Structure formats: C-alpha cells, structure tokens
Amino acid sequence: MDWSLLACVLVEFGSGVLSLGAGRPDHWPVFYVHSVVGVAFVFLLFFKLRRVRNRVTDARLWDRATVLSVLTATVAVAALATGVWWVLGGNARVLAYWNLLNLHVGLGLLLLPLVVAHLVTRYRPPRRADFEGRRTALRYGALLVGGALLFRVQELLAVALETPGRRRRFTGSKPVEGDGLEPEGETGDGNASFPVTSWVADDPDPVDEASWRLRVGGLTDSTLELSADELAPDAERRVLLDCTSGWYAERDWRGVRLGSVLDAAAPDDDARWVTVHSVTGYRWSFPIAEAREMLLATHVGGERLTHGHGFPLRLVAPDRRGFQWIKWVEAIEVRRRRDAAQWTAVLLSGFR
C-alpha cells in the first residue's frame, strides 16, 4: 500500500510540475493524468487510513514515527480536499493572496518529502508477490479506469447542474468573470478587468517612461535602443491569458509585433532562441519562430497598461502560462541556445 501511494504521489508531483508550463491545448494529457491518478489516490488513501486507524486511535500503539505518519496523512487529505473543492467550483481565498489552487500546489509540494520520510520510517522492501497476479492487475486497472470514469462523471454533472466548476479550462483555470477573482470595481476589458499577479517577489518601482529604453541585441546585425515613442502600436490580437494561480481572461491586446522588432535588429542565421528580460531580472526564453508571433503589448482593452500589468511593455505569449508573459520588459536578447541561467533568475528576480 505504501509503495502504491508513493507511486501516486510521484505521478501527481511530476504531472503537477509539468502542468505549470503547459498551456497549449495539446498539453491536456498532463492535466488528465493528474486528475485521474488523483482520484485513484483518494481510494488508496481511504483503504490505507482504514487499515491503520487502530494504530492511531490507540495511544498504546504509538511509536516515534506516529507523529510523522499523522502529519503525512493530514497533508495528504488536505491536498486532496483542496484539489477536489477546486474542481467542484470552490474558490475561497485561504491565506492572504493564496486561493484553493495555490494551497493545493503548496500542499502537493510538501507531500512528496513527507511520504518519502514516512516510507523510510516504515520501510519494507516491495516483494514480487505484492504486484504479480491477475487479481492485483485487475485492482490497479479498476482504480485507474474508475478514476477516469468518476472524473468524467463530475464534468458532466458540473455542466448539467451549472456549477461554478463547469467553465474550467483543461488546465483547471476558471474565468475571471463571476468567480470571485475579479478586482472590486471591475469595468470593461481593460486593466481593472483581471487580477494583477506577479512572480514571487517581483514588485519593481514604477518605470520612468521618459528614460526607459528597450534594448535589442545578441546575435543580431545591429543593437537597438528604442524609446517608448519609437514603439508605436501596430498590431492588435485577442489572446487568452491563463495564470497558474487558477484564473484565465481573454482580452484584446495592442502593441508591437515582436517579429517586427527582431527584423529591425536582423538576427543572425545561427539565431534559434529569444530571451525576454524584465527590469526585475526575471527572464524567459522562447524558440525564435514562436517568439516572432508574440506581441510586446502597450495596451489592454483599449487602455494603456498600468504598472501592475507591466507598463510600459508586457510580453503577450499565446498558449503560454501567465508567468511566461514577462512584465516590465526592458531587453530582447537573440541567442543560439536557450538561456539556462533563466532558472537562477527566476529564483532571484525581485530580490536584487
């Protein structure tokens, strides 16, 4: 049972981490696997708790590992409960800026080391007999098939009963409208119509537009420094922003085509990647062909971007999750390879 639970937690952890960067419709299997295995995990945990309930309720049977076991079980139940509540339409704010989905992610990250520690304290190597045999295969098959069926049933019931969960995307995110996420005084489709969210500690001082410049360089024939006046909007697109904190909003964005900016700098033949830099030090890399289709936005919903939404320039990256829509853009770097140091920048941005 413990090894089966660990397998579920590993799948949930891996698929959960992968889901943070999965935004294209063809990424749906990542989220589907996460949901189905999550349902199977519920049943396994139920049988596990039923089996050990006497060892927990009878204090005479406690040992040095019991407290860890109880903590692990509590975190597991809480992780499952927050995930199920989110799927069924719940959306309460639970800790400051954290909603149910944020809490679910945090509990999931905490659960893996706890389960590993629990397994160490109760270590028993798996035996071949534990997993062989037709009956065992049927049990595991029934868990997965049952999980898939139950997940599909809840989707159909959500639509039939018109619950708040019916409008979730395949990513699990819910629309801003009418789900309690929209800011007070929401109007139109502009800045106030969707939340201001930032990566971890990214909270720079307002950018001085007069002195701000967009630097474009790297593997290019020329290095550019463009002022705000030189970035006159020349394109408008309606693009869906899907934030990993659990909401999405489809808005009209206006700005400058990133492809036009790249053409002005003339990338070398060896150029394969484009890294977009924020004033906070945060940055992300994209294949150059994909980057050409992105937008450096100056307006949303007909309004000039506010500071919270990335003034004076924000990357609009279709089919990418919200944390990859770089705010407060200050530089475009053309590269031969992906910027491996972006992972360090992600952890340190906002603290410099």
Image (cartoon, rainbow, N blue to C red):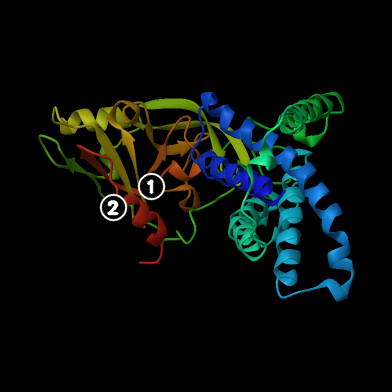
Question: Residue 176, can we see it?
Answer: no
Which of disc 1 and disc 2 is earlier in sequence?
2
Spot occupied by residue 212 in the image (x, y as percentages of width and height): 28, 52
Spot occupied by residue 174 in the image (x, y as percentages of width and height): 67, 37
Determine which residue is flagged by label 2: 212
* Residues under numbered marks 2 and 1 in contact, where contact means CB atoms less than 8 Å apart: yes
- Residue type, label 1: Pro
**For the residue carrying disc 1, how many other residues have a C-alpha within 10 Å: few (<14), some (14-19), or many (20+)?**
many
For residue 59, which quarter of the picture? bottom right
Q: What's the residue at 14%, 36% (across, down)?
A: 220
Horizontal placement of 314 versus 154: left or right?
A: left
SS class, disc 2: loop
Spot occupied by residue 258 in the image (x, y as percentages of width and height): 31, 32
Q: Nearer the viewer, residue 224 or 247?
A: 247
Q: What's the residue at 14%, 41% (across, down)?
A: 223
Determine which residue is flagged by label 1: 312
* Distance Cα–Cα, label 2 vs label 1: 9 Å
Q: Nearer the viewer, residue 103 or 282?
A: 103
Horizontal placement of 114 versus 134: left or right?
A: left
Compared to 100, does 146 lie above or below? Answer: above
Q: The C terminus appears in which quarter of the rendering?
A: bottom left
Q: What's the residue at 61%, 59% (across, down)?
A: 110
- Residue type, label 2: Trp
Please tell me the numbered disc located at residue 278. none
For residue 136, which quarter of the picture? top right
Q: Nearer the viewer, residue 326 or 228?
A: 326
**For the residue carrying disc 2, how many other residues have a C-alpha within 10 Å: few (<14), some (14-19), or many (20+)?**
some
Question: Residue 334, can we see it?
Answer: yes
Spot occupied by residue 180 in the image (x, y as percentages of width and height): 73, 46
SS class, disc 1: loop
